[in-house]
Image (cartoon, rainbow, N blue to C red):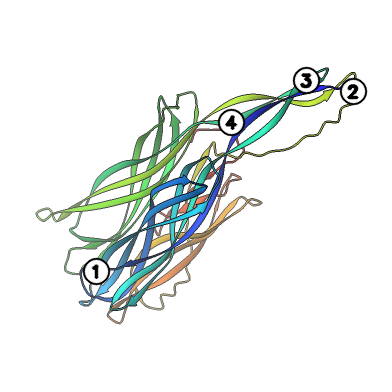
Amino acid sequence: MSVQPNFEERNFSGEGLAVRRTEVECKINPDEEIKKVLAVKGTASSVGEEITDGEIRFSGRAVFQIVYESESGALRKTECGVEFSNKAECDAAGIRYADYSVSDEEIKFVNGSYVVNASVTTEIVTETTVRASVFTGGEDILCDYEDKEFSSVAGCGRGVLQTDDEFELNYPVKDIVAHTETVSLTEVKSGLGVVILDGTVFLSMTVLQNTEKNDIIKESRGVPFRLELEMPAASPEMQAYARAAVAKSAFKVVVDEEKNSSTVIVSVDLDAYACVTQTHTEKFVRDAYSPINELAVTVADFTAVSATAGYCINERVSGKTDFNADGREVVAVICERVEGVSVNAENGTINGLLTATVIYDEQGSLAGERAVMPFEVPHHSRAAPCISPSGWRVSITASGLLPNSRPCSG
């Protein structure tokens, strides 16, 4: 007499990753003639992503800040932008979010004009499904069951959120020559139909004074925010995970000539993604026995990894760069960026390089040179973080995913 096992089909959601590198080119149209290009820094943001016929098709926009010396010897800035698109093979069920970053910026003089060449790396986190046929018992089969706890995603959402601020400077501003924005999430909560994001946008600005000497000053500000991302599936008892990146920023300066001061008005658009999770229990057969037949039980493993929690690290770092001043007068340090990040799980550290461009005076003319400073900060998670700078004297902001973990808010 044969036994009759029963099987049940169950779906487990997870995440996949698609990575593509896109080469872009952008023509520079400065307000004044360029005598010398001093620095360039690119950022990129999403225009849209979709899955069609087994492919991810995505598009974005790259924006470049260019700092240069004009023919009159003045420090000037300009911006240019270009849209791009690409695709990647994909069999995922959907898209959760996408990250865009720019590297390898290079300026060339081609056919009488300056152009920027750069690479944009797109990392798209996709929604995947693992389907498993699970043995649940059967006729004339005695089973030893065990309960396993799972954290499942109840809902995900993505949107553009805006935060604004203004602050006073006790001098007249001629221009904001360069700027860097970084997002740090400090708390994430699930509410009724929304996910609440608390955090700070760190601003690092290189400001040109409107004075006789046209001095350059570095200004740093933290813009706190509390924003809500709509999430119909969210409820207060759920746990939440979120991430946010700067999609666009705008600065406006109002000068009060009577008070000899300035008001800086800043607006930042955040590309925000969040998911809410809930914990449930699934029953699995640990062992099986039949009083009338000899059974051979085999176990197959499957994996469906999905982010259910996140963490942030803020650490102040300092150290020596490879820039040799050699008696040169440093005018400004601009275009900060973190590169080459790696995680050492054994000693619990995050290592990387903080890079920037040093603007200095060279015999009455301006020059720019890349400077590199290695750093090491502690971390207490198995996850590999993504790091970005908020200034040359910098609070490093780290965020990452915790796969196969129980959910937590924050």
Q: CA distance from mark 1 to mark 2?
A: 84 Å
Label 2 vs label 4: CA separation? 37 Å
Residue 335 visible in rendering: yes
Q: Label 4 vs label 3: CA separation?
A: 28 Å
Distance, label 4 to label 1, CA atoms, is 53 Å
- Any mark on residue 30, and which? 1
Rendered location of residue 204, percent (x, y): 34, 55
What residue lies at 33% left-to-right and 77% top-to-bottom? 110
Residue 174 x, y percent position in the rendering: 19, 62
SS class, disc 3: strand
Q: Which amino acid is tagged 3?
A: Gly
**Which element is circle 2 on?**
loop
Which residue matches tag 3?
138
Labelled disc at residue 151: 4
Which of pointers 1 and 3 lies earlier in the amino acid sequence? 1
Q: Earlier in the sequence, mark 3 or mark 2?
A: 3
Q: Earlier in the sequence, mark 4 or mark 1?
A: 1
Along the polypeptide, which appears first: circle 2 or circle 4?
4
Residue 379 as seen in the image, left or right of residue 206: right
Residue under circle 2? 293
Quick check: marks 4 and 3 in contact, CB under 8 Å?
no
Q: Who is closer to the viewer here, 21 or 91?
A: 91
Give the residue type that dot 1 points to.
Pro
The crowding category of the residue bearing disc 4, from other C-alpha atoms within 10 Å (few below 14, some 14 to 19, many at least 20), is some
